[in-house]
Image (cartoon, rainbow, N blue to C red):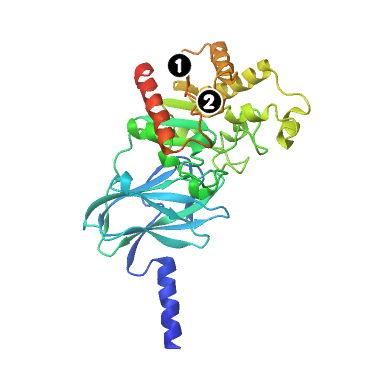
Amino acid sequence: MLKNYLISLLLFVTLTGCYGNIPVPFSQKNISYRGRVEFLKGQCARIYWPGTSVTINFKGTGIKAVLKNGKEDAYFYSIVDGNEQGAKKIKADTIKSAIELASGLNNSRHTVQLFKLSNNTSTTNFYGFELADGSTVLNADPLPKRKIEFYGNSITAGHGVDVQPGQDDSGSPEYFNNYLTYAARTARHFHAQYSCIARSGIGVLVSWFPIIMPEMYDRLNPADPASKWNFSKYTPDVVVINLFQNDAWLTTNYQYEQFKARFGTTPPDEPTIIRAYQNFVKSIRTNYPNASIICVLGSMDATKKGSPWPGYIEKAVKGLNDPKLYTHFFAYKDTPGHPKAAEQKVMADDLINFIDKNINW
């Protein structure tokens, strides 16, 4: 009996991670959040969107995060003291449990960031941190003054970034890595707050599933039409829109169910495509009247030679006659699958150069 009790106690300590640790609830004032996060009073912070992050400063030797995941797997980076090369990939469990983010640290000041890598189709409850005995929570760093926000599809979400040769690029959660996307890299380069509203497979007129970006962009919970985001909580200086890759595939895919649902038997003509893009941009402009908005496309085959889709964007932007609206197109990468880490870096360097030359923020 004693043996069974000790085994049960050890299992409890392993799963909860609370034995001998100092709990820091999700609502602690010195925990810093970036991205759209839903706060359930007295319960948890709920994380949906790729690129959402939670950061804490503390003095101590170790830290865990108490998480519970939904049905779809979700992966995060644990980044200690800004050491990107040493980032630890963790997977949240469907059982509420404490997952080690770092241990064996020097008993000094540390910063730990929990950064969501996965698509917005996964949901994770964050209940707080647990610090090693003797630790102390320190004041949060001031948030960067610059703010940037991205609206995009698989390229922006980070679909397939971690895929290696011979591995499946169909969208397995473990191969998403938003941290290494052009979007997150650009935000870090400019030391800007980062918000990423992206889902793999989404389009402006049609997607690989029933919802399109104009129907999802204003949500807090991307799966709930009634869950609306309060745009006054985050006002970016720069907005980057990278959409139309999926539209390029699906607006002529006559047999696909979403084509039939959106268009019947007749594909959208050029004026319809341009108008749909303009309407979405106008929605963004309504919420952010002073932001610089960059309409980009690429680096997959929507920007290959002969593609009409960059031209649609150019015509849409010209027709809006907005002095703070820009276009920029990433070169076609001409390789299989989604952009990998190195290709995402090329895109980031390109976008950074464009922003440096054109936008004063």
Instruction: Say if residue 230 shows up in the picture.
Output: no
**Element assignment for label 2:** helix
| Residue 220 horizontal side relative to residue 254, left or right | left
Q: Residue furthest right?
A: 265
Give left or right: position of 234 versus 313: left
- Taking the spot 28% from the left edge, 65% from the top edge, the residue there is 133
Q: Are marks 2 and 1 in contact (CB under 8 Å)?
A: no
N-terminal of the pair, mark 2 or mark 1, is 2
Callout 2 crowding tier (Cα within 10 Å): few <14, some 14–19, many ≥20: some
Question: Which circle marks residue 110 in the picture?
Answer: none
Query: Where is residue 260 drawn, in percent x and y?
Result: 76, 32
Q: Which mark is residue 284?
A: 2
* Residue that carries the numbered disc 1 in the rendered image: 324
The residue sitting at the bottom extreme is: 1
Q: CA distance from mark 2 to mark 1?
A: 12 Å
Is residue 90 visible to the viewer in this orientation of the structure? yes
The quadrant the C terminus occupies is top left
Residue found 50% across the figure and 38% down from its top: 157
Question: How crowded is the residue under tag 1: few (<14 C-alpha within 10 Å), some, or many (20+)?
Answer: some
Q: Is residue 12 above or below residue 252?
A: below
Residue 143 in the image: above or below residue 205: below
Which is nearer the eye, 89 or 161? 161
Q: What amino acid is found at the position of numbered circle 1 in the picture?
A: Lys
